[in-house]
Amino acid sequence: MKVFISRDIPAQGIELMRNEGLEVTVWKVDRPMTQPELIENAKQSDALLCVFSDKIDKLFLNECRHLKVIAQLAVGYDNIDIDEATRLRIPIGNTPDVLSEATADAAFLLMLAASRKAFHLHKSIIKGEWTFFRPKANLGIELRNKTLGIFGLGRIGTEMAKRCKGAYQMDVIYCSRSRNSSAEELLQARKVEFDELLSQSDVLSVHCSLNETTNGLFNKEAFHKMKRSAIFINTARGTIHNEKDLIDALSERIIWGAGLDVTNPEPMRPSNPLLSMENVAVLPHVGSATIEARNAMSRLSAENIIHGLRGEKLPNIVNPGIYNR
């Protein structure tokens, strides 16, 4: 059977599939595929291994309804029309757990960088602006004993909370659809309503999925409810925050700083005002970019493909309802 991979991925997963006897083709061109290109290649395959920037919408799924399995090299799957895939009985797999630590590390890094203006100060050295000691210049803020607010206390959010609790004895509050009893016991985390999360957090870190309720949730109204000393962190999806409203909130000192691994659009334009703000740290969506995490993601994606082509339940299934039909 044939597998098409829409982006060059770590070799572990490719080797695993080839050892299974699968014929694997990888898109090697150093640019994203267009949707017509993706459809054309998927039509010649039995399975697709895709990335979060691929558009797996109703058009694609109906053009490629023959696919026996689609495995995404990511935890999130907002780029995939899950309802349509389920209707067509195409199993969709993802890669949970294995990138939680790496993404939490990125969120922690962004929090520290924003709190001490690290990215801005690094650029000032390159510009030759490091001259002499000024006691009131370049002041950051400390994090010890502050309050961490987590929006979406799942695997990644919990790992972020562990780091903040362990390093800085931060109090943890969270807002999620469901209660996280284990995190409450382990971290003394307290579940709060959204408005309290906004008003009480010194650092507010976003770790939710992107859906109709979270799209654009962190907007002008939300930022105005936050502390003027607050740092906003987003390592989930760029459209969860309204970028213009965030720029305005930072420019007008409604909030103190921000750390972003995700933006809207992606890639971010070099002229974006966020890149020149001293209290802002931006990374190019690299939360899972460690050798260990990407190897594990490649392996999990391959395992989803292998099980799907065997006609077995995927180890990490997004739409388990297909098996009940």
Image (cartoon, helix red, strand yellow):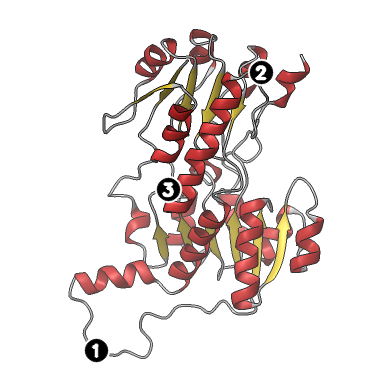
Query: Could you say which disc has been placed on residue 72 in the image?
Result: none
CA–CA distance in space, label 1 to label 3: 35 Å
Q: Position of residue 295 (x, y in %)?
A: 46, 45
Of labels 1 and 3, the one closer to you: 3
Relative side of 65 to 201, left or right:
left
Q: Residues within 10 Å of mark 3 (few under 14, many from 20)?
A: some
Q: Residue at x 50, y 11 (%)?
A: 64
| Label 1 element class | loop
Q: Residue at x 60, y 79 (%)?
A: 144
Q: Nearer the viewer, residue 216 or 20?
A: 20
Q: Residues within 10 Å of mark 1 (few under 14, many from 20)?
A: few
Of labels 1 and 2, the one closer to you: 2
Residue 183 visible at all: yes
The residue type indicated by label 2 comes to Thr
Q: Nearer the viewer, residue 251 or 10?
A: 10
Q: Position of residue 17 (x, y in %)?
A: 47, 29
Mark closest to the chain's N terminus, 2 or 3? 2
Q: Which residue is mark 2?
A: 86
How many numbered marks have been drawn onto this rendered protein structure?
Answer: 3
Query: What is the quadrant of residue 318 in the picture?
Result: top right
Q: Which residue is mark 3?
A: 285
Q: Which residue is mark 1?
A: 132
The residue type indicated by label 1 comes to Phe
The residue type indicated by label 3 comes to His
Q: Nearer the viewer, residue 214 or 101?
A: 101
